[in-house]
């Protein structure tokens, strides 16, 4: 299927990985994810010539101070070319959001329901630790050293040019303090 997708023009595949913790995935009803199979899935996608784009959420119940470095190291070691890191956002009228609004939300400004704001008290981190750890993960993943390691030194990378240009554009945004998913 991946080979057919590549031949049809698929060059990037966004994957809602969310977390490297199975317990965290249970907390957001993503039990269909198999954390122990992520590495193999990334390898198969890359072997088919498609660039995996990992989407990660920080601030889930099991996240502690180690989660940021562990996540970046894991993705870097697998040479995942692109990742987006998000702060858990408790949107009202969602199961997770409603639970957090009842117990942990301290900032009710709806304009703050996006990065770089932390509007609730995480279980194992302070709001400042979550925000600072999230930004440090973004900076570390898109450091020039990491870009070279993940993109330029990855063997058989059919999408090397687009991966490099995407990473370089993100690096430029980060240098200006702009989150990679925002325009500016």
Image (cartoon, grey):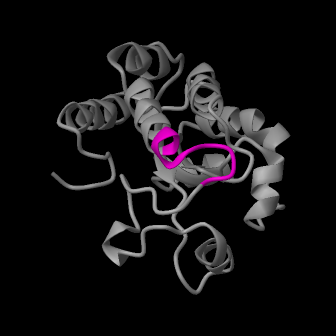
- Residue that appears at 73% across and 33% down: 39
- Residue that appears at 41% across and 17% down: 152
- Residue that appears at 53% across and 51% down: 13
Can residue 46 be seen here? The reply is yes
Expressed as whole percent of the image width and height from the top left, the position of residue 162 reads 33, 36
Q: Nearer the viewer, residue 159 or 79?
A: 79
Going by the image, does 65 lie left or right of 6?
A: right
Q: Which residues are magenta?
A: 122-130
Can residue 34 be seen here? The reply is no
| Count of marks placed on residues | 0
Expressed as whole percent of the image width and height from the top left, the position of residue 57 reads 57, 51
- Residue that appears at 74% across and 40% down: 38
Going by the image, does 178 lie left or right of 119?
A: left
Q: Nearer the viewer, residue 29 or 144?
A: 29
Res 117 quadrant in image: bottom left
Q: Is residue 151 above or below residue 54?
A: above
Going by the image, does 20 lie left or right of 183?
A: right
Q: Is residue 75 above or below residue 117?
A: above
Res 103 quadrant in image: bottom right
Would residue 52 be counted in the magenta stretch?
no
Res 167 quadrant in image: top left
């Amino acid at each position: 299927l991946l080979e057919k997708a590549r031949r049809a023009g698929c060059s990037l595949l966004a994957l809602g990985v969310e977390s490297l913790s199975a317990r965290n995935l249970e907390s957001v009803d993503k039990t269909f994810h198999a954390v122990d199979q992520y590495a193999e899935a990334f390898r198969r996608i890359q072997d088919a010539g498609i660039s995996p784009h990992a989407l990660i959420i920080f601030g889930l119940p099991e996240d502690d101070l180690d989660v940021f470095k562990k996540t970046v190291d894991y993705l870097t070691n697998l040479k995942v070319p692109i990742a987006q890191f998000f702060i858990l956002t408790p949107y009202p009228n969602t199961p997770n959001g409603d639970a957090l609004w009842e117990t942990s939300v301290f900032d009710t400004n709806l304009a703050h329901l996006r990065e770089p704001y932390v509007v609730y008290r995480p279980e194992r981190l302070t709001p400042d630790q979550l925000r600072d750890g999230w930004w440090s993960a973004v900076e570390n993943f898109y450091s020039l050293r990491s870009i070279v390691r993940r993109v330029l030194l990855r063997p058989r990378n059919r999408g090397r040019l687009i991966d490099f240009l995407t990473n370089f554009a993100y690096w430029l945004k980060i240098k200006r303090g702009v989150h990679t998913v925002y325009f500016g």
